[in-house]
Image (tube, rainbow, N blue to C red):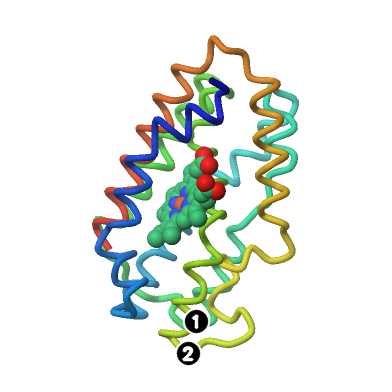
Amino acid sequence: MCLMCELKSETKYLHVRLMHSKYFQAMLRGNFSLEMYLNELFGLEVIYSGIESKIQKYKNTELDFIYENYIYKVSWIRDDISYFNHEKFNPKEKVIEKAEKFKEAFCNALNKNIVESFGYLYILEGSALGTFILKKHVVRKLNLTNDGGTKFLSNSQIDVKEHWANLKDYVNNNVSAGFKPSVIEEAINGFKIINEMYAAI
Ligand code: HEM
């Protein structure tokens, strides 16, 4: 089975667990607050700011194509936070602790082996595939307009499906089979930590 197929099948139960978390159930059922959303945005800010500052230093590696085509997102997250004038919001400690844990696991993998780090990048890149569903609910519940407060969920100017298709092709054709078990192990670890972060919101 191809690496991207295995990643999907081996982490499916963790994606399902995420979708059934209190946070996403509240979002999908309209039983959702700005405070919950801000906790998510602050957690994501920790993750994306931490890894995006590192990614720039990892060019010219086996995952060149993936890291060169990576679209930086932390400015969208910060704009979303600013939109609500909540730069000084006090997020839950546990959310930040889990976000730091994800960031550290990602950075450790980057230091150990750039290919294994893909297990974590897989989670972040894949998460863009569901944002169009989530955005509708956030916009409706928080009465938002014109991407204000939802830049991250809007994936401005990206064709998410095309970006994902290119990423899948590259990974399936360029990552050697020997790396499969460790990439999958890192992805499972990352998905478990992300579940912990969302459970803490
Ligand atoms: C209720 C919340 C969520 C919904 C409704 C949702 C929905 C989706 C959808 C529709 C897909 C595309 C599935 C396909 O084409 O087969 C997808 C893929 C994916 N999502 Fe989510 N998602 C949610 C939350 C998340 C979160 C929070 C993350 C991680 C931070 C995440 C990570 C992924 C990954 C890694 C994939 C790629 C799976 C693959 O094809 O290999 N999702 N999601």
The residue sitting at 56% across, 54% down in the picture is: 129
The residue sitting at 57% across, 46% down in the picture is: 125
Left or right: residue 43 compared with residue 4: left
Residue furthest to the front in view is 1
- Name the amino acid type tagged 2: Asn
Q: Which residue is mark 2?
A: 143
Q: Residues within 10 Å of mark 1 (few under 14, many from 20)?
A: some
Left or right: residue 27 compared with residue 155: left
State the separation of the CA atoms marked 2 and 1.
6 Å
Q: Which element is circle 2 on? A: loop
x and y, in percent, of residue 123 in the image: 48, 42
x and y, in percent, of residue 121 in the image: 54, 39
30 to 115, vertically: above or below: below
x and y, in percent, of residue 61 in the image: 70, 23
Q: Which residue is mark 1?
A: 139
Say whether residue 47 is visible.
no
- Name the amino acid type tagged 1: Val
Q: Are marks 2 and 1 in contact (CB under 8 Å)?
A: yes
Q: Quadrant of residue 36?
A: bottom left
